[in-house]
Image (cartoon, rainbow, N blue to C red):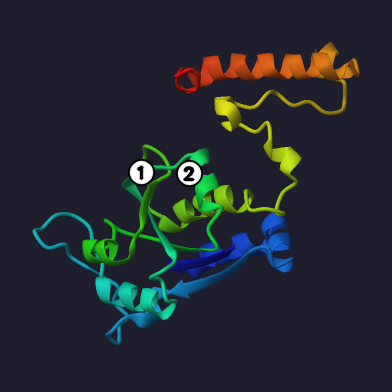
């Protein structure tokens, strides 16, 4: 899978691709990426990429010319183009799994009040909301999407590690424990020390349901509909 990221702040994005599992995925060529600073496509000597909104209002809007030129430079049409925005469709694990099947993903990192609507109309396939809140950095939102998607690409992470993660089968993940057996007077549940795999699996499923009921009852309701 290849990621094209369009941003005014490439340094924020670049470090993500050079660390941990992502770095190994890039090295093994399971993942590739290109970061484009669309300020390089600005039309004036000051490299202006934002302007005041028509109709008035607070804040600034990303101009269409530099962003459009940057999208044309990477041949964005024909690729899956994403734009993280609070007014987009809710991002879920299921959504991430569908994106993981793509070979090329383009992500536009917005700033200020957002980007000119004409760019959305001409290029964007998916407007994606990562949560019911607002942040100032489109780069951070883009990295959330990338992190959720790339780990689902075949060969990036052992498939066994993905089976019982949160949101799989509509449930949250069970609690995890490791050494030592006792910490601050709290001990690992006996069942996990028993070696009885059937009982362990039963306990884990019970804990998944228990946690989902406490934290996200809406997931249980959706699971049973």
Q: Is residue 178 left or right of residue 165?
A: right
217 up-or-down from 137: above or below: above
Can you see residue 187? no
Labels 2 & 1 near each other (Cβ < 8 A)? yes
Which residue appears at 38% of the width and 70% of the height? 77
Q: Quadrant of the N terminus?
A: bottom right
Q: Which residue is mark 1?
A: 89
1 up-or-down from 160: above or below: below
Comparing 70 with 205, the one in front is 205
For the residue carrying disc 2, how many other residues have a C-alpha within 10 Å: few (<14), some (14-19), or many (20+)? some
Give x and y (percent) for residue 81.
Answer: 41, 62
Q: Mark 2 to mark 1: distance in Å?
A: 10 Å
Give x and y (percent) for residue 3.
Answer: 53, 65
Mark found first going from the N terminus, 2 or 1: 1
Q: Which residue is mark 2?
A: 95
Q: Quadrant of residue 23?
A: bottom right
Which residue appears at 38% of the width and 73% of the height? 71
Q: Is residue 32 left or right of residue 196?
A: left
Q: Is residue 46 left or right of residue 73?
A: left
Comparing 64 with 13, the one in front is 64
Q: Quadrant of the C terminus?
A: top left
Comparing 89 with 214, the one in front is 89
Give x and y (percent) for residue 62.
Answer: 28, 66
Which residue appears at 70% of the width and 61% of the height? 25
Give x and y (percent) for residue 24.
Answer: 73, 61
Q: Secondary structure at mark 1?
A: strand
Q: Secondary structure at mark 2?
A: helix
For the residue carrying disc 1, how many other residues have a C-alpha within 10 Å: few (<14), some (14-19), or many (20+)? some
Q: Quadrant of residue 196?
A: top right
């Amino acid at each position: 899978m290849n990621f094209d990221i369009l941003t005014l702040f490439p340094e924020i994005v670049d470090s993500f691709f050079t660390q941990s599992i992502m770095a190994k995925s890039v090295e093994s060529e399971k993942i590739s990426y290109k970061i484009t600073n669309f300020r390089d496509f600005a039309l004036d000597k000051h490299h202006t990429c934002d302007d005041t909104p028509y109709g008035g209002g607070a804040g600034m809007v990303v101009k269409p010319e530099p962003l459009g030129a940057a999208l044309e430079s990477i041949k964005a049409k024909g690729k899956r183009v994403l734009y993280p925005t609070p007014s987009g469709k809710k991002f879920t694990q299921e959504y991430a799994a569908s994106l993981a099947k793509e070979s090329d993903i383009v992500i536009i990192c917005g700033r200020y009040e957002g980007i000119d609507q004409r760019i959305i109309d001409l290029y964007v396939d998916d407007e994606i909301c990562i949560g019911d809140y607002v942040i100032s950095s489109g780069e951070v939102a883009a990295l959330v999407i990338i992190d959720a998607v790339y780990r689902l690409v075949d060969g990036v992470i052992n498939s066994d590690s993905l089976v019982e993660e949160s949101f799989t089968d509509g449930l949250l993940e069970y609690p995890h424990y490791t050494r030592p057996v006792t910490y601050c007077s709290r001990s690992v549940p006996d069942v996990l020390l028993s070696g009885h795999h059937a009982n362990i699996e039963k306990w884990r499923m019970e804990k998944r349901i228990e946690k989902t009921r406490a934290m996200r009852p809406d997931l249980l309701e959706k699971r049973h509909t």
